[in-house]
């Protein structure tokens, strides 16, 4: 009996985890849907999600390939920047579709990441996200890149975007675009990752309908099926 149980435990350990299914995206980020979306982890060693309430509302699902890229990028950052912490924000619904108030996020390939910040002690901390500031989306940084004693951590942000790109390429994909306040992008290009970002990234050139200073929006380039009446 003991040997049988050991065998069962061994078999179970070799099985893929529950989330190891393949998603299918349809259409575009602005007009699409998603099948078999995967929920991003609630937290990890160096990252957290932006809201338990939003998670319960099902607003943290992505395409399975995006899941792998995002989680692997955080693991990479643990090694190269162990002193930095990160927070992801809105992603999309498990089956995609319109994702108010966003104009995209409809097919599992869009992820918002809260801007990394540094506190007055020069420590990497999480941007505060709660219902009273619309889970962080109401935050506005001033002309000195500061908000309530916090300053934008451009090195951490640049490192994260580079990690996302490298992991996407490693899995045979790419990043389509990064949306971040055009006036602040020069600060990213002034980091040690600046040349890499300018060479490999497509950043938004014009201001978006919302400022995108408290978060940066990343669209992943993963093959999707065309939209159908049921897809």
Image: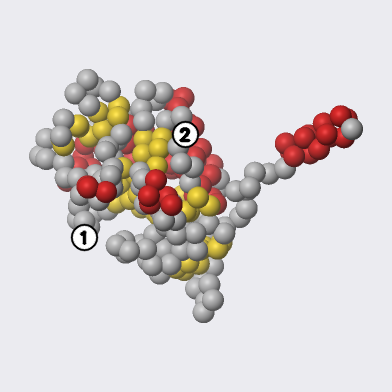
Residue at which label 1 appears: 209
Give the farthest residue toward the top: 121
Q: Is residue 8 left or right of residue 71?
A: right
Asked whether residue 220 appears in the rendered view, the answer is no
Q: Residues within 10 Å of mark 1 (few under 14, many from 20)?
A: few
Of badges 2 and 1, nearer the viewer stands: 2
Q: Which residue does the image show at 50% across and 50% down from the upper left?
A: 39
* Residue 150 lies in quadrant: top left
Query: For the residue labelled by badge 1, is the local secondary structure a helix, a strand or a loop?
Result: loop
**Taking 129 as reference, is 107 above or below it?**
below
Query: In the image, residue 99 lies at what x, y percent?
Result: 37, 63
Query: For the residue labelled by badge 2, is the local secondary structure a helix, a strand or a loop?
Result: loop
Q: Which residue does the image show at 20% across and 32% down from the upper left?
A: 151
**What is the number of callouts on the image?**
2
Quadrant where the N terminus is found in the figure: top right
Query: In the image, residue 2 lies at what x, y percent?
Result: 86, 29
Give the farthest residue toward the front: 1
Query: Real-space Cα distance between discs 2 and 1?
Result: 31 Å
* Rendered image: mark on residue 44: 2
Task: Return the disc, 2 or 1, that comes first in the chain's sequence.
Answer: 2
Q: Is residue 143 left or right of residue 150?
A: left
* Rendered image: mark on residue 47: none
Q: Please state which of residues 166 and 219 is positioned toward the viewer in this rendering.
A: 219
């Amino acid at each position: 009996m003991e040997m049988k149980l050991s065998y069962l435990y061994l078999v179970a350990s070799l099985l893929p985890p529950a989330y190891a299914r393949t998603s299918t995206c349809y259409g575009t980020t602005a007009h699409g849907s998603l099948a078999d979306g995967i929920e991003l982890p609630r937290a990890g060693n160096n990252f957290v999600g932006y809201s338990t309430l939003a998670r319960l509302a099902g607003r943290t699902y992505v395409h399975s390939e995006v899941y792998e890229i995002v989680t692997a990028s955080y693991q990479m950052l643990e090694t190269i920047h162990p002193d930095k912490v990160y927070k992801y924000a809105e992603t999309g619904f498990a089956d995609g579709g319109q994702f108010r108030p966003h104009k995209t996020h409809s097919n599992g390939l869009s992820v918002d990441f809260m801007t990394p910040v540094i506190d007055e002690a020069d420590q990497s901390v999480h941007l505060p996200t709660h219902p009273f500031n619309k889970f962080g989306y109401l935050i506005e940084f001033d002309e000195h890149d500061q908000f309530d004693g916090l300053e934008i951590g451009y090195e951490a942000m640049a490192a994260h975007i580079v990690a996302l790109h490298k992991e996407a390429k490693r899995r045979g994909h790419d990043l389509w675009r990064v949306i971040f306040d055009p006036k602040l992008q020069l600060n990213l290009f002034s980091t040690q990752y600046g040349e890499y970002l300018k060479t490999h990234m497509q950043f938004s050139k014009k201001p978006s309908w919302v400022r995108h200073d408290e978060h940066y929006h990343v669209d992943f380039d993963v093959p999707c099926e065309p939209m159908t009446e049921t897809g």
